[in-house]
Image (cartoon, grey):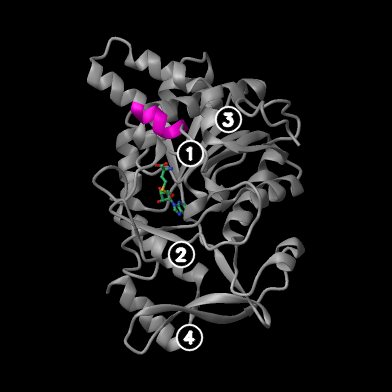
Amino acid sequence: MRLAETLKERIRRAGPISVADYMEACANAYYAKGDAFGAGGDFITAPEISQTFGEIVGLWCAVTWQALGSPKAFRLIECGPGRGTLMADALRAAARVPGFKDAARIHLVERSAKLREKQREALKGEVVSWHDDIDDVPLGVAIVVANEFLDALPIRQWEKTGRGWIERAVDVNASGAFRFTRGAARDLDIPLAISADAKEGAIFETSPAVIGWTRALANRLVEHGGAALVIDYGHTATAVGDTLQAVKAHRYHSALEDPGEADLTAHVDFEAVGTAAREMGAKVFGPVPQGGWLARLGITVRAAQLAAGKDELKAKEIEGAVRRLVAPDGMGLLFKVLAFTHPALEACEGFEQDAAR
Ligand code: SAH
């Protein structure tokens, strides 16, 4: 049965479901298909745009490993590795740093069997373990990367009404189409600064899944050592706004149409992520815009190296792809980079503009 039918049956039986439950069901069905990425799929991500992205992330991992004291063995973990492109590019670049590759134990957190298969192919020749959840990865010093992972985790949406904040839910109308409605839950936990300024009808988003992931990982890094790098689209400061979006075949799509057939995501609240990590005792660097972070780590130099000796068309293509990653009107400003680490880590590469707090 298609997901739409399963969800309609569930709603008819038990009433409207929360946006979070709807989003989770969609994500599971969508990623299980395993054919979302790249020019022929629904959307394209930074590592699929240019190999330099994964290479720079790999160099960040290697420098961070050195800053952690070059441990003889550590866990290199990626959450939501997609097609495995980022990890393959990262390993190739980081292998130039003596000792890094031998010390790295590679762990991928991925639930989709089809995507695991693609990752296995991209990482042929490497020893890799797969896990459904980051909590299943064995303990030890860890360097963790998550690019466009948190945006896929479910959010809850709250609407400001005359009777306070009420959770938004998904229902089915008389003609059988999905629609938004008001659910039963009332949130008493909306930040005061947000609540005081919000107008009636405003939407506020929270993500227990994102915060739960951050807290568990920060706790682990504080206890066992290591650092996590989060890259995603989102906002630096907590704010109201409806950011739930669906993308299919590189175009925006209705979030309520064809559930499970489009990529359903939300912007990441980086202030909330930073606060959650700090509350667990981690040190937080950023968020900083992706463009500046990549530039400080040398992406332009790397692009020039790659383009040197190539014919003009190819060289232009390489430079154009990198421009898309860093340009303010491309991914350079909308995407942010944040790291949280063991509190003893003094500096973190690429965040110099923003002193650690
Ligand atoms: N990082 C990749 C892919 C981003 S898409 C890139 O930049 O190209 C999101 C990825 O997260 C997919 O691999 C998807 O299967 C995975 N994913 C989504 N929700 C997940 C969850 N709850 N647990 C584990 N993996 C998840």
Q: Nearer the viewer, residue 279 or 190?
A: 190
Badge number at residue 15: 4
Q: Earlier in the sequence, mark 2 or mark 1?
A: 2
Left or right of 348 in this view: 130: left
Q: Earlier in the sequence, mark 4 or mark 1?
A: 4
- Percent from the top left, x then y, of residue 217? 63, 46
Res 125 → quadrant: top left
Residue carrying label 1 = 107
Q: Is mark 2 within 8 Å of ligand 1?
A: yes
Res 309 → quadrant: top left
Residue lying furthest top in this view? Answer: 309
Res 324 → quadrant: top left
Of the residues shown, which amino acid type is indicated by label 4?
Answer: Gly
- How crowded pointer 2 is (Cα within 10 Å; few <14, some 14-19, many 20+) is rated as some
Of the residues shown, which amino acid type is indicated by label 1?
Answer: His
**Are discs 2 and 4 less than 8 Å apart at CB?**
no
> In the image, is residue 152 part of the stretch drawn in magenta?
no
Front tag of 3 and 2: 2
Please tell me how many numbered marks the rendered image carries.
4
Tell me what residue is drawn at x 52 percent, y 50 percent.
150
* The magenta segment: 320-326
Residue carrying label 3 = 74
- Percent from the top left, x then y, of residue 327? 46, 33
Of the residues shown, which amino acid type is indicated by label 2?
Answer: Glu
Residue carrying label 2 = 24
Could you tell me how far apart the alpha carbons at marks 2 and 4 are, in whole angstroms? 17 Å
**Are discs 3 and 4 less than 8 Å apart at CB?**
no
